[in-house]
Every structure is written in C-alpha cells, then in structure tokens.
Amino acid sequence: MPIDLAAPETSGSTTTAGRGKRPRPPFGVSAVSVIAVLIALFSLIPLGYVIVMTAATGWDTAVGLIFRERVGELLLNTLLLMAITVPLCVALGVGGAWLVERTTLRGHKWWAVLLAAPLAIPAFVNSYAWVSAIPSLGGLWSGVLIATLSYFPLVYIPAAATLSRLDPAIEQSAASLGLGAWRTFFRVVLPQLRIAMTGGALLVSLHLLAEYGAFAMIRFDTFTTAIMVQYQSTFNGTAGNMLASVLVFFCLILLLAEVRSRGTARYARVGSGAQARALRLPLHAYQAPSQLFLMCLTALAFGLPLVFVLRWIFAGGTQIWVADEFLPALLQTMGYGLAGALATTVVAFPMAYLAVRHPGWFSKALELSNYVTSSMPGIVVGLAFVTVSIRVAPGFYQTTALLIAAYVLLFLPRALVNIRAGLAQAPKELDEAAQALGKPPLVSFIRVTLRLTAPAAAGGAALVFLAIVNELTATLLLSPNGTRTLATEFWSKSSEIDYAGAAPYALLMILISAPMTYLLFQQSKKVAGQ
Amino acid sequence: MKIRTNALAGIALAATAALGLAACGSGSSTPAASSAAAGGSNAGEITVYNAQHESLTKEWIDAFTAETGVKVTLRQGSDTEMSNQIIQEGAASPADVFLTENSPAMAQVENAGLFADVDTATIDQVPAEYRPSTGKWTGIAARSTVLVYDKAKLSEDQLPKSMLDLAKPEWKGKWAASPSGADFQAIVSALLELKGEAAAEEWLKGMKENFKAYKGNSTAMKAVNAGEVDAALIYHYYYYGDQAKTGENSKNVTPYYFKNQDPGAFVSVSGGGVLKSSKNAAAAQSFLKFITGKKGQEVLQKGNSFEYAIASDVPANDKLVPLTELQAPTVDPAKLNSEKVTELMTKAGLL
C-alpha cells in the first residue's frame, strides 16, 4: 500500500526539472529507464494474475461466484467499516494534529509524539489486547473501534506535518477580514489540509481492505478474511480468486478516487522570504477538556494494548520466554525487515530519479503501475506469487528471495515517496558543479546526490521495515519452509488462544517498531519543513 | 553534513546486516542439498507439511530426531490448504511427509496419485479400521466429534438427539462452530458420506441460519464458556486439553457425545503419508513408522494433545472416554471428499 505521508511536499516541488530545453537523455538515464520499466513490468504480475485467473474461470462461473449472497455480506461489512472508520480517523487525526500544532496545548511536544505512537502497535496486537480486555468483542463496531485506534496516526502524521509548515499569514489575513477562529479553521486551514487528509484517508481505506489478523480475531468478516479462509480451505481455489478480483477492483476505485479528489490546486508558497512562525491559538477553558480527550485517546490506542501485553507477560511468567523459539523469530523478522527495506529502497531509487529529474508521462506511468500493485492486499500478491512461481519459476518457489520481492512490490511507494522528496531537495546544479570540477557522472551522483538523499531514503526504509515487521498474510503464504517471524508466531499462538505464549512476540514487535515510528515521525516533520 | 554522513553510514551498516541476516535466513531455510552428507547412517533431512497441531508434531519430531539424527523442517498450514498445495507443487514438492488432522485431505492427495506406498512395517502397526485399504497413507491418531454446552443454559433433555437437529429452527442463534477449520469440514464430509449430498446441503443451509461462526475450535469453546452461545460443535480434545491446563476456557463447559452411529458421533482419523517425490524416502518412511510405533503413540497417550492413540496397541489417555464406547458411525476414511465439501460450504455461504 502506498504510504503517502510526505505527499503534500512532493506535489509542488518537482517542477524545476521541467524547465528549459530537453537534451537527449545520456546513457545513464536510458539504463535507469530500462531498469524502471523492468521493475514496473514485474510489479504488474499480481494484477495480471487476478485478470488471468478471472478470465480462466469462465464468465458464468465467475459471475456465479461473485454475485452471490456471501459476497453481498462481505461487501456490506467492508463498506460499512470504511464508511464509519475513515471519517473517524480523519476527524481524530486532523483534530489531534491541530491541537498539537496550532494551540497552546500544554505539553504539546509530548502529545505530538504520543499521538504517532499507536503506529508502533500492529493492528492485530491491538485486537488481541482488546479481546483480552473484553472477550465478547465481535462484529462491525468492534472492527471500527480497533481499526480507528490503530490507523488514525496515518492521518495524524501528514496532517501535523502540513499544519506545522502552513503559512500563518493567510490565517492572519482571514482574521483581519473578520473571520472568527472556528470559521478561519474551516474556511482557511482545513482546505489546505486536503492533500494530507485525502492521502491519509486513502491509506486508512487500503489498510481496512487489507487487514486480516485484527478482524479475524474479533470475528468480523471482510474480503481479506474471507479470502484467507478460502485459501486455507482450498489453497488456490477459484472462489478465493474471485473474491480477490472484487477486492482488487475496490482498491483500484479507491486509488482513482484519491487521484481525482487531490485536484490540481496549488498549495505551496510562492516567492522568497521567510515564513512566519504560526501563532498558537489560546485554549483557555478548553485546555482541560483537550488534555482529557488526548489522554483518553492515547490510553485507548496505546496504553491499553501495552498494558494487556504486559499483563499476559507477567501472567505467563518466565516459561513463555523460550529462547530457541523467540530468538530465531526475532532474527528472522529483523533479517526480513532489513533486507526488505534495503531492497525496496534500492528499487525505488531509479523510479524516484526519473520522476524528479525527468518528469513526464513516462515516469508517471511507471509510478502508477507501482501504486496499483501496492494498493493490493498482501494476500492477493501472495496468491499471485505462489501460483506464478510454482508454474513459471519453480526455483524461486518458497525462497527468501520471492518473499522479499513481494515485500518490495507491496511497500515500494513508502520508499518511493520519501526518496522522491529527498531527491527534489537535492539541487541538480550541485551534481553538475561536481561534474564541471572533473568528477565522472557516477562519482558525482554518489558523492553529491545520493548523500543528500540519504536521510529521506532512511525515512522511507524505516517505513518499509515497520510494514514488514507487521506483515502477516503474504508472509504466511510465501515464507520458506521452517520460517518463523514474530508476526506468524504471534498469530499461531494467539489463534490457539495461548494469549500468554503470544505476548512475548507482541512485545518484541512493539519494541522493534517503536524506534522506527519515532524516526518516521521526525522525518515527516523535516520533510515538511523544507 | 555531519548528520547526513552518519545517516549514510547507518544505511551502509543496515545494508550489511541485512545481507548477512538474509544470507543466514536463506541458508537455513532452503532445502539442504548436502543432506546426505550430514552424518550418521540414518541421518538426513526431511520436510514435513504439517496440518496437525504444531505442538503435537513438535513432540514427535523432537523424539524422532533424538533417536535417528534426522533433522525435520516443518511447514505449518491447514489440511486442505496443504493438500491442494502439494497437488499444485506436483513432483517438485519440497514435502517429504504430509500429516493432517483429518482424512479428507489425505484422500485428496491419494487421488492425485502423489503418495508412495506406506512401508508394510508401518501398516502392520495400525489396525485396519484406522487406515485406508489402499495402503497409500495411514492413520496416526484420532479425534471424536463432541457438542460442548453450557449446563446453566441447556438441561440434558434439551440436548439434540442427533447432530442433524442443530439445523432445526429451535437452535437458531444457539450454537457455534469453526467452519473454516479442517475439523469441521471433516465432520461435514462424514455427513456427506453417510447421508448423501442433498441431506448435507440441506443441513448446511440450516446451519448458516442458526450458527455463530468462530475462528478455531478453542475459540468456539471459549465462547460457550463465556456464555456468548449455548453450545459448540467441536472435537473432544479441546475440552480435555483446557481442563488439563488451567480450565480457564472450559470451566462452565460440559462435553456431550451423540453416540448411536450418528453423524455427530463421527471419529475422524488423522493421516500421515510419504510423498512419491520425496528425496529422502527412507527417512520419511522411518518418521511415519516412528509416530505410529509405540513411542510415537505414547506421545498421544501421555502428552498434552489428548488425541486418541490408535496404533501399536497403545491405549488412549485415561482421561478420555474410550474409543470403543463412542459408537461412532462406520466411514471409510479414504472416501471422504474435501473438494465436494468446500464446494457445498461455499454454496451455502459458509466460506
């Protein structure tokens, strides 16, 4: 799924490269293009798989499997979940960001970090904690509760980043023209948050479509949980494939809707000069209720899961820490996370380079093909890779390489968006200057551009790492024999309601996710402050 | 520039670590080519596609590896997921041995012609009623269908005489099951074999109206225990397993056996077989012989799995109702049809 956390910044910043004459691309650029095209083609495998499978099923069978009562149930469940959860996430994310960034909220620096913290807790761990607290949880409203608490930071982080760099001059003008604080917020501030909100909403929606563990645990059926059930019953049956095609259809619709709603309006400041510091709105009587509200929110989203994980840890005592079970899982997870983050960053580079330095329909098309794939849930990509590798490349079946390749496809935009922002900030002129001083192009590229892009790339890599640590479905389908990751171990223990045995894995996942979440939060602020 | 240099160094470090770890990861997980060179006379490596409970198979593996030196790699999945996977993998399957919870998935792989004959030494250890007559695979353990219920909500005279009664309107909203599990699908396949397709379809339709879906038998039992639902159709050992531990998820639960050769008294045979494509058939056969042998069956008798021992004259765990008292219907395990079952269940809107 695309993480568009830094999206607001990239939209206006790629224009410089398009100016002036266009020389014929040197050999290096052509090579980069070829690589990018190959990656794009590779990334279309899952979509091709869904189309081929649907076609191979035959029209009548496909229609019979798609237009049936069960699919209607899943459709209703999934749509209701999205219709309720997405607005809640946007309201909580934007509201939280506004309190933290633009009001005299006491301790706003602490709150700023705390509101991003739930991102370090995988949704299925959240679900496990809530089921421990209230065992009877189930159905739509429990799904809404858990999804909202898990995913609102996906709106909060970009919203906070955008708010922290909005030019207060516009708001001051509005105020001087007689608009009150509330109306200024709705008529001036909120419209400028549009990109952050639509991007965040898209992300939340795609997560809702793709989530498996969290909803399976509370017995709430969506397309993804139903596909997983079909997979476990038939490995690769047509019914599951048809459900997957419906799911992919939804993802594409969402992607299109987001592109449309993003619009063409320009939000960036024009001209030189320093931006004024934003004034913080005094909260006065609202100080106490605001504090209370944020306390409740973070207690539910972050405190409760942590407390229940720790409770199970203490309840389980020392015997749940079986070193020869959790150590390999930890190492395996770290290994996959690092290798996947590295591979994704490397693969994202040529794409980002073309997008920033050679924008046009070509680079746009390449980028779009990746967004399409990454909008597909892990289970669909997993199914595609299993089928394709068994038939076409049996040598890659059940290898680490195939799993990493799936991670790359699933999480490429997370790296891409960050690297693109970083590249846009590294002036081409510096590279050219280095070349003028006698450095060969490759050397100047590595010593100047790559170095300037490194922090942004690190941010992207952190995001990918975080995603891999929490990934469940693709890992379950594709991992090599004998593989244990923290997520799969946690899942196998918690499905057998061995909650105490699952707790160490939950804790380890949170512990290795926390620093990445912090890095990511810092990075989003830095990029926004360009 | 200082920070950026550090970041770059950080990435380089991470990259090196990633490559190192990835190398370790792939090194240990790819099927070893040098398996034969590993040592002792009987040593080597086999891969087991395991749909049985992981903890039970791990007990078997630990004892087997200790005795023979053969290293065993596990891939965990569900019955039909793995049977279909083996069929798709065909001759290239990395699996040497396939273990299931129930027999329909075994029959499926057998019908695809992918099993090698089981060694006669192994067959001789298992009574005829717990293995298919073809000798392409063997029973390794057994489990009985049971209705666990909440005594506070249902009195004994309210209990259904037959599993088929659960499709009647008076049971609406009162019982739970885990339709995605192989266990439940095996019960349906027995019903299909005993009563025919029309009856099975009818029953599944009534079930869809009446039941509450849970993921996993233990979760369904937990729901009965917590008072969310009156009864759950599961296998017996979830109850006994929980009783032996803390009883936390079964203290309000009572097991009820249908008996009378009812479809609900079905005893399901867990299967084990060696793949024709196995690259280490000798070690794979010896693993199967081990788990159906005395030591392997004693793991069932004395361990915490509470599944029935069926072979090598090892009696069942003495906490269980003996197999002979269950009055199970006679079903040939080789005849159970998993594909038809998932098709019927998909049609009924349960999957």
Image (spheres, coloured by chain):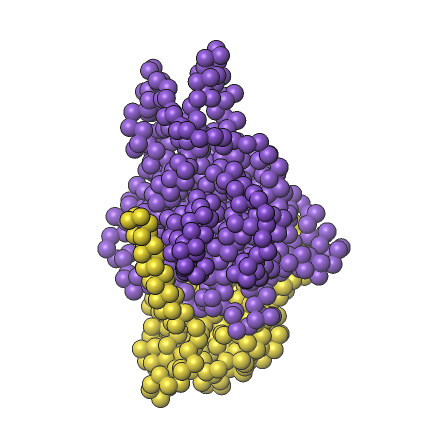
Classify residue A128 by image quadrant: top left
How many numbered dots are placed on residues in this image? 0
Name the residue at the top extreme: A178
| Closer to the camera in the image, B334 or A122 | A122
Could you say where residue A363 lies in the image, as x and y percent from the top left? 58, 51
Residue shown at the point (31%, 52%) measured from the top left: B5
- On the image, the x and y values in percent for residue A197 come to 50, 33
Q: Quadrant of the C terminus of chain A?
A: top left
User: Which tint was used for chain B?
Assistant: yellow
Q: Residue furthest right?
A: A60
Q: Residue B327, image x and y in percent? A: 52, 64
In this view of the protein, can residue A38 be seen by the observer?
A: yes
Q: Residue at x 47, y 30 (%)?
A: A271
Residue displayed at 33% across by 24% down: A105
Q: Residue furthest front?
A: A437
Picture quadrant where residue A280 is located: top left
